[in-house]
Amino acid sequence: MNQPRLEQRAHSAIRIPHSKILLGAHMSISGGLHTSIERARSINCTAMQIFVKNNMQWFARPLTPKEIAAFLNHTQRGELLSIFAHANYLINLAATNPQFHANSLRALSEELIRADQLKLPFLVLHPGAHLGAGEEAGLEKIIGSINRVFRRIPKVKTRIALETTAGQGSCLGHTFEQIAYIISRVREPERLGVCLDTAHVFAAGYDISSESAFRKTLREFDRVIGRDRLVAIHVNDSKTARGSRVDRHEHIGKGKIGLDAFGFIMGNRRFHKIPKVLETPKGKDLVEDVENLKTLRGLIKPAPH
Ligand code: ZN
Ligand code: FE
Ligand code: FE
């Protein structure tokens, strides 16, 4: 009696070859943007996230045509089925200091331009931290800032993917409602997507630790934000407990979330076309990435019908 069912399972597993799963990691651009492609492919990534400039600096000189070409025409670029960007951590669209705020708008505009030149579909961005001004004031400031940035660069096709945050300190974006509110109030919502970070939503209080809990959280996401907004997943385990509001990434299976959540992500059909990237601690030789990717690939189960 069990036999046909097992066969069917094996079949649907085969339908998703490992080479087609959009899975990878954040990669360093040290040594030139194009070198990230080589790093990612050296460990068989099919998806990759990068910074579009040094992450510790506000601004950089514009990309040269040579740098852009080295990235776009790289012989291995086609082997990465999804490449996208993450914005600089200094950017805070809710900054209360006028100079920091002005820098944030300029840096975000420039990074979107760079990402567009590299033909990247979106730039992941933490919505912002209100720094004591309060949630409402912070959200209004973020909305106004996004409007201004988009108006400055009307031709840029790269979208902003708002990332769900852990809610550490005064960081906004730790509830789906806050993200939905920003999207609903921005003048050009078609230029926004959402990136779901497993460690962040967990630390923010959402339960994803079992399949049924994860499904419930996703229903919430769909109801509040909308299913079609999801463009990427950051797959990170969490060093900190659910609801801790503390953002500490941990290796897959070594943290508090547990493997069930990651098995669900790897096996769920709705995530097949969504790039999944690690942002877990690692060294230059990428051994930690190799280990985490192996763990994730090992969790692939047939998609539920
Ligand atoms: Zn992020
Ligand atoms: Fe993240
Ligand atoms: Fe984080």
Image: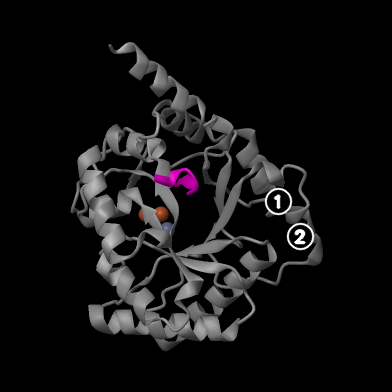
Residue 210 among magenta residues: no
Residues at discs 2 and 1 in contact (Cβ within 8 Å): yes
Magenta segment, which residues? 270-279
- What secondary structure is marked by label 2? helix
Indicate the quadrant containing the C terminus: top left, top right, bottom left or bottom right. top left
As drawn, 242 above or below 121: above
Residue designated by label 2 = 67
Q: How many marks?
A: 2
Residue 235 in the image: state x and y as whole percent. Answer: 40, 45
Indicate the quadrant containing the N terminus: top left, top right, bottom left or bottom right. top left
Can residue 159 be spotted in the picture?
yes
Report the front residue among 194 and 95: 194
Residue 91 in the image: state x and y as whole percent. Answer: 46, 72
Q: Residue at x 21, y 41 (%)?
A: 212
The Cα atoms of the two marked residues, 2 and 1, are separated by 8 Å
As drawn, 266 above or below 26: above
Instruction: Report whether 287 appears left or right of 128.
Output: right
- What secondary structure is marked by label 1? loop
Report the front residue among 176 and 239: 176
Q: Amino acid at mark 1?
A: His
Residue designated by label 1 = 34
Earlier in the chain: of badge 2 and badge 1, it is 1
